[in-house]
Amino acid sequence: MTAWEDLLKLARACDTVGAVRLVTELDEAGRKAIATELPRYVTRQSRSAPWWEWPRARMPLMAAGIACMSGAAAVSAWLLRREFRWASGSGQEEHVLGLLRRRPAEWQADVARRIAARLRLPDLAHWEVAAAIVRETGAEPPQEDAFMVGWLRELDPATAAGDPLFAAYGPRIFEIDGLGATNLWPVVEAVVRLTGDGLLDRAAVIDGLVRRLLRDGSAALIPLAGLHDRLDPDLDEAAARARDYARLLPAGPTAVADMALAQLRRLEEAGRLEEELFTESVAALAFRPEKKLLRAAVSWAGDAVLRDARRVDDVLAALAMIFVQDTLALQERAVRLAVKVAPQAGEPGREAVRQAAVELPAELREKISAAYGGGLAELAELAALAEEQAPAAAPLAAGRASRLPPPIASPDELARAIAGFGWPPDPYEFERLLAGLAEWSHREPAALREALRPWWRSLSHGDYGHYGGELREGIAEGLRQAFLAFAAPERSKALSRKAGPKHRRPGALDVLDRLYLSRALELVPHFEEGGGYPVLLATPTAGTGHIDPGVLIDRLQQLEAAGVAALPADLAQALLRLPREVSGADARRAETLTSEAGRSCAAWMRGGGPADPEVRVSMGKGPGWYAYDLRIAIEPPAADLPEPIRRLFGPRSGYSYTLDWWPLVLPSHRELVAAHLAAHLPQTMESRDRQVEVLASLVHGEGALGAATAHALVCGMGHMSAAGRAAATDALLTLAARGEVPAAALGEAVTQLAGAGLLKLNRVVAVLEDATQAGAHEAVWALITHILPGLLPKEGERPRPGVADLLAAGARAARIGRVRADLPEVAAVAARKGSSRLVQEARRLRHLVSAP
């Protein structure tokens, strides 16, 4: 056997020591030959080797390359190849270091510099190798940010004293740009200990972390506020940084502002805060949106006035800003304090309060009027005038559907596009690729085969879904099979023969996903016979997924002229993408078609397609650890519908990575798409994936909206991520602009999901408030009036968290829309004794909607 064959045998056996011994015993020419062959082999094997085989061979091959290559540039590039990305760690770094230590120190330092320059967050492959070399050789510590983040992740107070990296980076910890790319809590503990041990200068640490908090503003790192509190500055240290603390109040995250407020308040209580900074700080807090900080501002202002009555006008100016906060509890606190200090108020403070009081509810305006004069009638008149002069809400505009990408313009472009098709898969790119394959297979078959040759030769069986004894039927894999069938028919036939006895993973695809897969796979036998295909029927002409009826007729005529039968899944998808209304002219044109597919199209256009099925949604036991799940029942389809369409009436629960593909399958039947979505979305509500963003595209289609759409939308409204809730807000705004909000169904869905514990009302309220601000107050009010009867607690019941916020959101929408309504359930709560927030918000809403 040759040395190369021996090396491959050792690599397959995962024998790293043997591989290194083999190549080091070779002469220079032998090592050079191995070094020349290795890159090509690694590229090929990483793509074509079975998934269980390549990981075993990686480390021996990487070690052999290090031993055979001579230059520092070549070795560092070899180490950082993407094929070896997962070969680092788990003790493998010692193998690499052992090989590198055989080289001169300056050569090692060059490798370390090159590795440091190419490190990328978050994985930092081979950071340990570069760090060990720098420490051992005394090389200059690299200045790259990613390298310093790697040091920060490994920071150990026990070994820091003798570490050259600590000496270089310790004083600059808070200047590292990538500070947030590591788990900062262990860093906090390390810095506290290092400061206590005297290895870090205390004043420099406090200055550095405050400067970093100021630099990052609203994106400041919360653990740094915790570090500040752990260091517990004394009054002298806090006084030296008082101006910086005041600068943190306007924009810092809540935890950072809270920390700064604590320092400023203790300075003020000790008489060591300048009056200018006190006034600036209270004013900054009054502009914050967080209720916690606003409550703290009122509390601090009240205490500060008791210590020095000369501050009263500055305090009243801040309280006046809190009057406009649309939160009843805050308004009441601010009014109580304003009334309390009224006797000490000067004219500037009194005028600020009177002007701001017009924003208060009537009962609070009355208290201000009694304490500050001006008369209740005058304040009420000013309030009415302010309401009349308020600008009308801007008209709502429906959001836009996605735009279609341009068609493939050449065989070379098609080859580049299929090579780049991967994760995450995109439905519009799928349609573009499939349409391009059909078009160019017919127009320039020879040129397309030549363009695709490098692509298919670089792929392994796994790229088509074949993994050992299992066949994974995925959309991307099916698309590649279609391309392979055209580009290399014999290779495709061999692959198709192997697919027969293989185990197909059950339930891997939803029925909507399977329609995409079927459209790709039904081209395979056609292409394996050596032919092309003139045109696909189902390629959409609009971003919603719709097909222009005239364009579909043109495509059917093209197939008839070529004497080619329509493909079943392609035809079914094309019919489903027709709009609900077809012009008489297009319907008459369709009657002239002579093929079986043409007659089906004419009948579809004549009858308007299938009727919207009735969809029923109920609660049931969830899968796995989920306590509840949504059960979807769809009215059975008509018996005369094509089989590919009939299958779409059977949704199943579970998980899919391609929910955003589904609206394009049924753009004229939104409720049917929503039925499939509602079976999946409950499992995504507490996850950080972006599947729920499909709601924003769902609503751009056509068709009835009912229980399924409502439940799907509510799953988005209750999503844990702001991006998920933003998608639900966009969907709600689009429906509101089109006058299509299913308020009654949405109210029922919110009540049902909240009652089952699947929904957090504070998230729903956030969506409703955003929609109100965007101009959808009428839709929000209609929705809230359908939610409240089912969620307001009966006498003696404990209210659900968020119900008071829901009442407040209703008050905001009602105020903007100047609503007058009779709400018996709200009135019943408002009539109860007590002063809980729920009762107060109910009274406020009742007064607002019953005012003359």
Image (cartoon, rainbow, N blue to C red):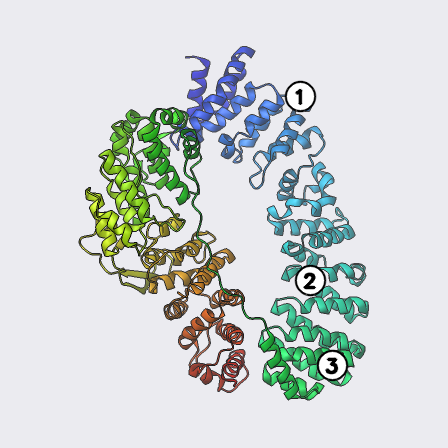
Q: How many marks?
A: 3
In the image, residue 122 sits, relative to residue 811, either above or below, namely: above
Disc 1 designates what residue?
104
Q: What kind of element bears circle 1? A: loop
- Name the residue rendered at 76%, 86% in the picture: 343
312 or 370, nearer to the observer = 370
Position of 384 with respect to 196 (left or right) is: left
Residue 90 spot, x, y in % from top left: 52, 36
Q: Earlier in the sequence, mark 2 or mark 1?
A: 1
Which mark is in front, 1 or 3?
3
276 or 97, nearer to the observer = 276
Q: Earlier in the sequence, mark 3 or mark 2?
A: 2
The kind of residue on which mark 2 rests is Pro
731 or 583, nearer to the observer = 583
Residue 716 spot, x, y in % from top left: 44, 60
Which mark is in front, 3 or 2?
3
Q: Earlier in the sequence, mark 1 or mark 3?
A: 1
In the image, residue 338 sits, relative to residue 57, either above or below, namely: below
The kind of residue on which mark 3 rests is Arg
Q: What kind of element bears circle 2? A: loop
Q: Dividing the picture into quarters, in which one does residue 379 lie? A: bottom right
Asked if residue 468 shows in the view, the reply is yes
Which mark is in front, 2 or 1?
2
778 or 488, nearer to the observer = 778
Position of 178 with respect to 466 (left or right) is: right
Disc 3 designates what residue?
350
The kind of residue on which mark 1 rests is Pro
- For the residues labelled 2 and 1, the Cα–Cα distance comes to 55 Å
Disc 2 designates what residue?
250
In the image, residue 159 sits, relative to residue 93, either above or below, namely: below
